[in-house]
Image (cartoon, rainbow, N blue to C red):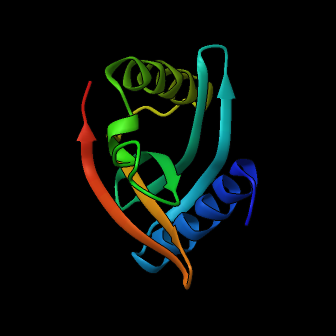
């Protein structure tokens, strides 16, 4: 059994591959700013997508998506604003997605929530 950190990293890697299969381009991984961290930043056409990855081995404590609380959303939004400013992104659409990754006996599966929350 993997520890939580290793499982989280594996879940992020799985999500990266999923995004690429969906035609997105991963721009950044584990972007850090003063306010927090964003797991993945990707481009989906003309949209910049900020992705929070939550990996779980069970739903005993609720779904992965439920772990992205209002407070966590606000931290992600503030961090996204830093990313936009630092990278001088002028004209683009933005979206906040959540990837619920389940770690099972036979590997990972994903429930991908587009537009999981907004500003």
Using the image, determine if residue 20 lies above or below residue 89: below
- Kindly give the residue lying farthest to the front in the view shown: 60
Using the image, determine if residue 82 lies above or below residue 110: above
Count of numbered circles in the view: 0
Residue drawn at x 47%, y 68% is 19
Q: Taking the image as drawn, is residue 37 in sight?
A: yes
Q: Position of residue 22 (x, y in %)?
A: 39, 75
Q: Position of residue 55 (x, y in %)?
A: 52, 54
Residue drawn at x 69%, y 49% is 4
Quadrant in the rendering for residue 86: top right
Instruction: Depth check: give the residue in front, 118 or 72.
Output: 72
Is residue 95 toward the left or the right of residue 9 in the image?
left
Instruction: Depth check: give the residue in front, 43 or 32.
Output: 32
Q: Quadrant of the C terminus?
A: top left
Q: Position of residue 36 (x, y in %)?
A: 61, 22
Is residue 104 toward the left or the right of residue 28 in the image?
left
Q: Position of residue 107 (x, y in %)?
A: 57, 80
Instruction: Depth check: give the residue in front, 25 or 110.
Output: 110
Is residue 56 toward the left or the right of residue 49 in the image?
right
Q: Taking the image as drawn, is residue 96 in sight?
A: no
Instruction: Depth check: give the residue in front, 21 or 110.
Output: 110
Is residue 20 toward the left or the right of residue 27 in the image?
left
Using the image, determine if residue 28 lies above or below residue 35: below
Residue drawn at x 73%, y 66% is 1
């Amino acid at each position: 059994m993997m520890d939580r950190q290793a499982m989280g990293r594996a879940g992020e890697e799985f999500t990266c591959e999923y995004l690429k299969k969906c035609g997105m381009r991963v721009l950044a991984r584990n972007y850090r700013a003063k306010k927090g961290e964003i797991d993945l930043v990707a481009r989906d056409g003309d949209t910049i997508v900020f992705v929070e990855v939550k990996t779980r081995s069970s739903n005993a404590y609720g779904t992965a998506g439920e772990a992205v609380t209002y407070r966590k959303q606000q931290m992600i939004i503030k961090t996204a604003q830093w990313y936009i400013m630092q990278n001088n992104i002028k004209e683009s659409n933005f979206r906040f997605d959540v990837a619920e990754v389940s770690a099972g006996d036979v590997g990972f599966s994903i429930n991908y929530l587009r537009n999981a929350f907004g500003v």
